[in-house]
Amino acid sequence: MELRTDPVAAALEMSESSESRDVETSEGDDYESLPPTASLATHMTAGAVAGILEHTVMYPVDSVKTRMQSLQPDPQAQYRGVYEALRRIVRTEGLLRPLRGLNVTMLGAGPAHALYFACYERVKHTLSDVLHNGRNSHVANGIAGSVATVLHDAVMNPAEVVKQRMQMYQSPYRGLLDCVRTVRQTEGLMAFYRSYSTQLTMNIPFQAVHFMTYELMQERLNPCRQYQPHTHIVSGAVAGAVGHLSGMANAFRTVYQLGGVPAFFKGVQARVIYQMPSTAIAWSVYEFFKYFLTKHQQERSLAGAAAT
């Protein structure tokens, strides 16, 4: 069968093809690709902002979670749910009571998350080059998440100790400095790291699964690795939920020894309400600032090159 070329039809096809390419280009420009690599300062800055915002936004729920997870709570601090707990705390202890201890959390969360994300990115890229020729490697993601957790918890653990003591019902401490001074004088400096090994036992499996899940979700939802806020939010929320389940499984033995079977159900509602949105906030804020700072650096470099 002989093929015939019609000049008019060919011209129309070329015009449609050109318009199609223009549409694709404009759609692609809506979300620019995330940088494959960013500077250490960018990772640390984006991580610090993400950590501070995550803990600040979710802090009232975290205060409730701490009280509801207590194995020996005060009779006046036993709650049926998160909303009821917040309402009672505000009514009986004051409007700002759910925010008590936020200052030490912000002081710890900034540097802890700066190291957390920067270490994760560096170790992930290094191991991916070795294990998978630079492509995404779930093993590399899991190992990088575990290493990042060791650094994060080393910085955050003292802040967690002070924060939880200030969050408890009828906490005897007047403030941050009073709590730090009293703990150091009565229990010694090691009190700030007494729970470090336990934290790592629970957090390393959680964070390994968390990072692997996040990167897997990004492969499915955002294979081109563009800056798309909704994919970072969804991936972060799913990663937080899946990682939390793995962390709970690893902590079963310790929790059972401390409080028996009922201890497993203390604060479950608060943990679920806290974990998914907090992880979604952390990842979406981190990815935004990584994109924003890297784009700003690239624009400055191009402007400098054009000037010369």
Image: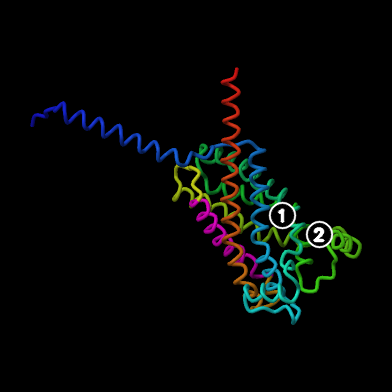
Q: Residue at x 67, y 38 (%)?
A: 41
Q: Which residue is drawn at 70% across and 79% down?
A: 78
Quarter occupied by residue 118 = top right
Q: Which residue is drawn at 60% across and 29% down?
A: 300
As displayed, is residue 96 above or below residue 28?
below
As displayed, is residue 37 above or below residue 144?
above
262 or 295: which is nearer to us?
295
The amino acid type found where label 2 is placed reads Phe
In the rendered image, residue 244, in percent from the top left (x then y), is placed at: 59, 63
Quarter occupied by residue 163 = bottom right
134 or 229: which is nearer to us?
229
Q: Residue 192 carries which label?
A: 2
Q: What stretch is highlighted in magenta?
A: 230-254
As displayed, is residue 261 above or below residue 176?
below
Residue marked by disc 1: 153
In the rendered image, residue 152, in percent from the top left (x then y), is placed at: 70, 51
In the rendered image, residue 290, in percent from the top left (x then y), is placed at: 59, 42
